[in-house]
Image (tube, helix red, strand yellow):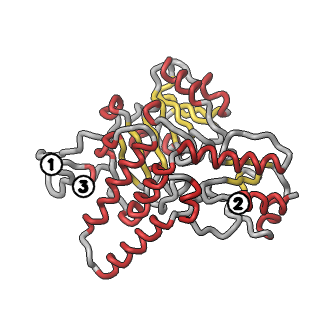
Amino acid sequence: MELHEAVHLWEPTPGYLNTASYGLPPRPALEAVRRVLGEWQRGDEPWSSWDVSTGRAREEFARLVGADADDIAVGAAVSQQLAPVAASLPSGAHVVVPEAEFTSNLFPWLVQDLNVRTVPLEKVAEAVDGRTALVAFSVVQSATGEVAPVDDIVAAARAHDALVVADATQAVGWLPVDARRFDVLACAAYKWLMAPRGAAFCYVAPAVRERIRPVAAGWYAGEEPSGEPHAYYGPPLRLASTARRFDLSPAWLSYVGAAPALELLGAIGVERIHAHDVALADRFLAGLGLPPTGSAIVSVDLPGAQERLAAAGVRAAVRDGRLRAAFHLYTTDADVDLALNALT
């Protein structure tokens, strides 16, 4: 699908530059949720009809990140998906994390009895050494939009046999990401994947699956000996042999909205989305006399910017004292110009 064919599927109020906070649903996602709300209200359908969307969303996310659906777990939030990884590390294990990392990929390590070292993002690779058990970082930093030096960090981790854990919440959906480069890659879907909050995905490499204890295992993580999913009652423990052993029982309405949103992203193609989003971000920076960054998220130090943008009806965010603007499929040149006129 071409971008110009998809643009009518969103109806934002002009001036929305805040996808890094939450994405806007395309019409198919919104209509799917509205339909199921009615079914829920009336009791017309069994829950299993809604749960089909969980499988659809899992498969589409896997395609977006170049993985197999069997290697993707579903859940509700990044911190929930990383907690079993942290809980499986030995006491005192050394973990390296960027110092400005979003807390969903920091608190899971800090609450355990681990030796967590935080360093500037550009120093993460050189901070990995023979003592390091795991390195965790965001593919794209939430506050600044900076794209991490993935090649350097992964190479350093592999050289020292350290696990590589990534938060791709601010990346998947606009930036091409290959999940197979990591041991674990988690992603909340309510930003660039434009799903309702309550849907999240986690790639777990087959090579590390047995090293992680599925401490949140429930009925949705089970598998009957016949191969049928969902072990409802009684022992013995019979977890799925795939990454589904890490599944959290899904919030059905969230996945009902996630499936069509992800399918639309797949139909358009991440390469096209990347070119569109970054071009708009670069246009915004050029209008401020700033160089391009290659990211769909930009962070600029402009005192009073949020107030001026709000007065013009432009929605953006402030993170770490700086204006953060984000540009996605439904952003237009007119949105960029509206923001620039307010700021300049």
Give coordinates of residue 147: x percent, y percent: 63, 38
Is disc 3 in contact with disc 2, using a CB cutoff of under 8 Å?
A: no
Figure check: 172 above or below 220: above
Residue at the image position 67 percent from the left and 53 percent from the top: 326
The residue tagged 3 is: 219
The amino acid type of the residue labelled 1 equals Glu
- Between the residue at mark 3 and the residue at mark 2, the CA separation in whole angstroms equals 40 Å
Q: Residues within 10 Å of mark 3 (few under 14, many from 20)?
A: some
Identity of the residue furthest to the left in this view? 226
Q: Nearer the viewer, residue 147 or 284?
A: 284
Figure check: 221 above or below 98: below
Give coordinates of residue 88: x percent, y percent: 38, 36
Name the image quarter holding the C terminus. Answer: bottom right
Q: Which mark is residue 224?
A: 1
Identity of the residue furthest to the bottom in this view? 42
The amino acid type of the residue labelled 2 equals Ala
Quadrant position of residue 245: top left
